[in-house]
Structure formats: C-alpha cells, structure tokens
Image: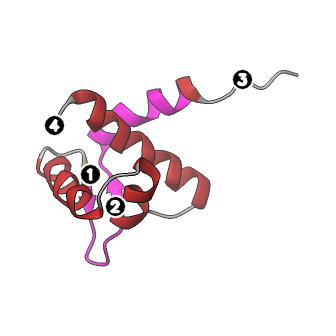
C-alpha cells in the first residue's frame, strides 16, 4: 500500500473517532474515502497486519499506538487554526 493511501486511511479513522466519539466501521471509512467497501476491507486487513490498527469482533476499527502516531500529526496539521 502506498504511504499516502495508508495515511489517508489512518487520518480518516482518527477524524471519524474524534468527530463521532466512537470507532468507525469499514463501510463508514469506505464512504469517507469514496472507495469500494470490499477493497476497503482488504486494505484494512493489510493495515491491521502491519500493526497500524485493529478490527474488533463487531467491526469497530481502532488505531494502535503506531497508527495513531501517524494519523495524529496529520490531523493536527490539517485542522483549521482558531484565532482569538
């Protein structure tokens, strides 16, 4: 998997969790990234095998420390600056 696609997945998972207060499911990530749900499941499996995330029995996707370490800086860089 290309590193930019990997980062897109991890960022989408992190932002979804921060926005909704819960872990996303594969179909929700597929919708966010506008990708085929079957392909997303395969790619999530690759990310899980690489140690970036885990997929729970109910399908909830959570980032591991490794995955969060990649996603967190990207999410913070893309967040709008709040002026006071």
Q: Is residue 46 above or below residue 20?
A: above
Are the two marked residues, 1 and 3, in contact with CB atoms closer than 8 angstroms? no
On the image, the x and y values in percent for residue 30 come to 37, 57
Horizontal side, residue 14 vs residue 5: left or right: right
58 and 6: which is toward the camera? 6
**Residue corresponding to mark 3:** 81
Element type where label 3 sits in the image: loop
- Residues at marks 1 and 2 touching, judged by CB atoms closer than 8 Å: yes
Q: Nearer the viewer, residue 35 or 23?
A: 35
Q: Where residue 3 appears, x then y in whole percent?
A: 23, 28
Q: Which of the two discs, 1 and 2, labels the residue nearer the N terminus?
A: 1
* Vertical comparison of 5 with 73: above or below: below
Q: Earlier in the sequence, mark 4 or mark 2?
A: 4
75 inside magenta stretch:
yes
Q: Which residue is mark 2?
A: 61
Q: Quadrant of the N terminus?
A: top left
* Residue at (59% x, 60% y) in the render: 20
Decide which of tag 3 and tag 4 comes sooner along the chain: 4
Labels 3 & 4 near each other (Cβ < 8 A): no
Disc 2, SS: strand
The span from disc 3 to disc 2 (Cα, nearest Å) is 28 Å
The alpha-carbon separation of the residues under discs 4 and 1 comes to 14 Å
Which mark's residue is nearer the viewer, 4 or 2? 4
Label whose residue precedes the other's in the sequence (3 or 2): 2
Q: Earlier in the sequence, mark 4 or mark 1?
A: 4
Quote the CA–CA distance across marks 4 and 2. Answer: 18 Å
- Please tell me the numbered disc located at residue 53: 1
Residue 25 appears in view: no
Residues shaded magenta:
54-76
């Amino acid at each position: 998997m290309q590193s930019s696609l990997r980062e897109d997945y991890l960022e989408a998972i992190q932002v979804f969790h921060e926005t909704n207060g819960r872990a996303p499911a594969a179909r929700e990530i597929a919708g966010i990234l506008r990708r085929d749900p079957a392909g997303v499941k395969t790619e999530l499996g690759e990310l899980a095998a690489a140690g970036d995330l885990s997929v729970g029995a109910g399908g909830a996707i959570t980032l591991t420390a490794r995955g969060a370490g990649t996603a967190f800086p990207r999410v913070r860089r893309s967040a709008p600056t709040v002026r006071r």
